[in-house]
Image (tube, rainbow, N blue to C red):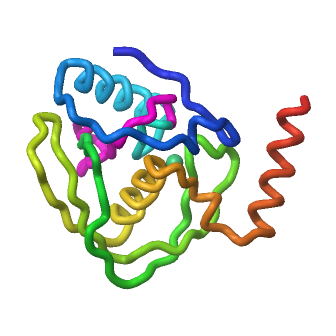
Amino acid sequence: MSIQKIYKYPDPVLRKKTEKITSFDEDLKNLVEDMVETMYDAPGIGLAAPQIGQSVKLIVVDITEDPEGEKKYMPMINPEIIVHEGKQLDEEGCLSVPELTANVNRYKEISVSYQDLEGKSRELSTENRFAVVLQHEIDHINGVLFLDHLSPLKRSLYKKKVKKWLVK
Ligand code: NI
């Protein structure tokens, strides 16, 4: 297991088309372990494969219930939102979009189809904060950043800020 580099906006790998995962092998388990380690090191509560430069449909999310207890996580392979309902506005940030938090409009409730590490098809329905995390991570495997959901003004202010960092 090892901590991987997290790619940051505007790296093109964050926009690249991702491949569906069809081999549920040792390589996939190793990739999941790397992503989990990278996510907790950051620290974050979710991570998508493109964020570590892997253009595949894989996300990991933190599902720890007791903050004092053992960390729990869930890998979701080939996840897709199949049902959505309602709206909510909540603050988001992203390990690939440093120094920005902003309110984003999301669905309130979602159902997601995905596969587990063994390749078994599963479905999960959730709402509120966890639904936000899943929508944010699933966006990543579709090349979308939370930045894309903001107003053109907020987006251009952030782009200017990033340009200044890149010049330095
Ligand atoms: Ni993110």
Asked if residue 56 is positioned above or below residue 115 in the image, the reply reads above
Q: Residue at x 21, y 52 (%)?
A: 114
Q: Is residue 37 left or right of residue 9?
A: left
Give coordinates of residue 9: x percent, y percent. 67, 42
Nearer to the camera, 68 or 90: 90
Q: Is residue 70 magenta?
A: yes
Question: Which residue range is magenta in the image?
Answer: 51-72
Q: Is residue 122 above or below residue 149?
A: above
The one of 29 and 121 positioned closer to us in this rendering = 121
Q: Quadrant of the C terminus?
A: top right
Task: Provide residue 159's location: percent of width, then percent of height.
Answer: 80, 51
Image position, residue 92 (x, y; %): 55, 60
Q: Residue at x 66, y 36 (%)?
A: 11
Residue 125 lies in quadrant: bottom left
* Residue that appears at 30% across and 29% down: 32
Q: Quadrant of residue 81?
A: bottom left
Q: Quadrant of the N terminus?
A: top left
Residue 76: x, y in percent? 26, 45
Helix, strand or loop for the magenta stretch, by majority: loop
